[in-house]
Image: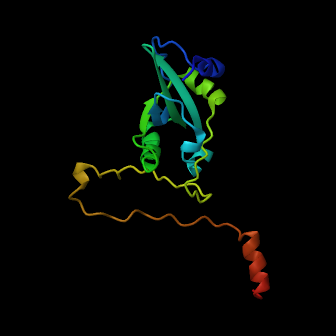
Amino acid sequence: MSTSTLEVTRVLRARGPKPLANGRFVVELAVSAQPFSPRDVPHLDLFGIYRLYHHIEGDEGRVRHALRLGFFNEAVAAQAVARYAGSYFDSPRVAQISPREETESRRHAFRAMKDVGATGRFAAIELSAPRHMPPAAAVGAPATAPAVAAPSPRPPSFWTRLFALRRGG
């Protein structure tokens, strides 16, 4: 890889102390010593929802290219997307980023062009948490039905009145 490529993109920076992370997360889809070719990266419908960008870091004379997908406020959401992306990439992982990287990602958007038979529909990724357990004191106690409040009297909606007129009511 020539240095002129790095100068043109102006992405390579000397690695120093990492800036503090702002709590945002990304999914690092792939890492390589060589730049990624858009024709070799599968185009997923997911890229229409999140930002796909090319990140470059320099460390002790070595260059590290990464394809990243962001941005997530919680690591759990990023992990769910990483599991989905695992069908197309070898080992996606979740990483926390700096505010500076998030800002600069706008200038380094990456367009994946490899056709993988996308349907044009976005994948649904469901995040769920375990249900809360009842307090220990209530475990042996019989369950009682909660009191149901009477519905508030409301006038019928416009559509209800319209259909009632059509039915002769």
Name the spot of residue 45 as percent of width and height, x first: 58, 51
Residue plotted at (46% across, 40% down): 78
Q: Quadrant of residue 145?
A: bottom left
Identify the image quadrant of the N terminus: top right
- State whether residue 123 is above or below residue 97: below
Identify the image quadrant of the C terminus: bottom right
- State whether residue 164 is above or below residue 146: below
Residue plotted at (23% across, 59% down): 141
Q: How many marks?
A: 0
Q: Quadrant of residue 152?
A: bottom right
Name the spot of residue 149 as percent of width and height, x first: 50, 63
Residue at the extreme front:
2
Judge from the rendering whether residue 159 lies leftward or rightward of residue 17; answer left or right: right
Judge from the rendering whether residue 12 lies leftward or rightward of residue 60; answer left or right: right
Closer-to-camera residue (21/26): 26
Residue at the extreme bottom:
168
Visible residue check, residue 13: yes
Residue plotted at (39% across, 40% down): 91
Closer-to-camera residue (163/24): 24
Name the spot of residue 63 as percent of width and height, x first: 48, 21
Visible residue check, residue 24: no
Residue plotted at (46% across, 48% down): 88
Closer-to-camera residue (52/161): 52
- State whether residue 111 is above or below residue 62: below
